Image (cartoon, rainbow, N blue to C red):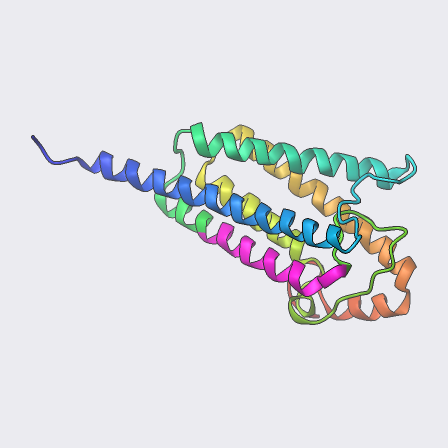
């Protein structure tokens, strides 16, 4: 009986990375859903994406974002389970690092936001601007976390269909950020303007 060849070990490494990809998704959405459950127990409706809104631009962008972010998860799962490997192992490793970073960033973001965290624009809820911790270097660390996970899983299980879904989801998240910035400017006025003048949209201070 001969020893396993190089191809066998490469395939084992690929499978290990795909397993890591599945775990990245599992951790991310466990945090997401767990936060929603905790807030629901306090009487807070976390998911306000395209809910209780008039059929305006805000509603349709949120609806498109919701569709995109749900669809890309399905594409990610299918790609991790069934897509053959395309990219070099070095790309896959970078993808795993990005995905894990996204998990950590998202967890820190929702914990720091406390009960002011919402998915979607909370037009009727009374929330506050959080500017401490991770929010002192990013105005949108949770959205940045989504992007890290999308990019990471794309590198781990690259295929052209997943690329299209990932880019579309990231574009919709960016549009949502722009909508939220307009809402926060109207709601918090000078307080948000000062914060916006000091901290960049995605990462870094001005």
Using residue 23 as the reference point, say whether residue 167 is left or right of it. right
Q: Main secondary structure of the magenta part?
A: helix
Q: Is residue 111 magenta?
A: yes
Q: Residue 60: tell me if it is visible.
A: yes
Which residue is at a point 69% across and 66% down the rendered structure image?
135
The image quadrant where one finds the N terminus is: top left
Q: Which image quarter: residue 16?
A: top left
| Residue 111, image x, y percentages | 65, 62
Magenta residues (range): 97-115
Indicate whether residue 73 is drawn in magenta. no
Position of residue 115 measured from the top left corner of the image (x, y, whole percent): 75, 60
Horizontal arrangement in the rendering, residue 68 relative to residue 190 (left or right): left
- Label count reads 0
Please state which of residues 106 and 140 is positioned toward the viewer in this rendering: 106
Residue 51 coordinates in the image, percent (x, y): 83, 39
Quarter-wise, where is residue 142 in the image?
A: bottom right
Residue under the image location 69 percent in, 49 percent down = 36
User: Who's the residue at 48% across and 31% down the image?
Assistant: 79
Does residue 159 appear anywhere in the picture?
no
x and y, in percent, of residue 123 in the image = 88, 50
Q: Taking 6 as reference, is 98 left or right?
A: right
Is 84 above or below relative to 29?
Answer: above
């Amino acid at each position: 009986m001969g020893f396993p060849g190089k191809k066998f070990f490469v395939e084992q490494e690929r499978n290990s990375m795909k397993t890591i990809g599945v775990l990245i998704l599992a951790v991310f959405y466990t945090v997401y859903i767990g936060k929603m459950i905790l807030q629901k127990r306090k009487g807070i409706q976390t998911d306000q994406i395209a809910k209780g809104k008039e059929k305006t631009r805000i509603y349709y962008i949120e609806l498109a974002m919701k569709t995109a972010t749900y669809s890309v998860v399905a594409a990610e799962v299918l790609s991790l389970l069934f897509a053959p490997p395309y990219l070099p192992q070095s790309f896959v490793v970078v993808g795993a690092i990005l995905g894990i970073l996204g998990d950590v960033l998202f967890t820190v973001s929702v914990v720091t936001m406390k009960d002011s965290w919402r998915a979607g624009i909370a037009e009727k809820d009374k929330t506050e601007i959080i500017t401490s911790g991770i929010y002192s270097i990013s105005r949108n660390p949770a959205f940045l976390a989504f992007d890290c996970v999308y990019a990471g899983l794309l590198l781990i299980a690259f295929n052209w269909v997943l690329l299209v879904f990932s880019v579309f989801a990231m574009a919709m998240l960016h549009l949502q950020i722009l909508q939220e910035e307009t809402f926060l400017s109207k709601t918090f006025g000078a307080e948000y303007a000062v914060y916006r003048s000091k901290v960049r949209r995605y990462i870094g201070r001005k």
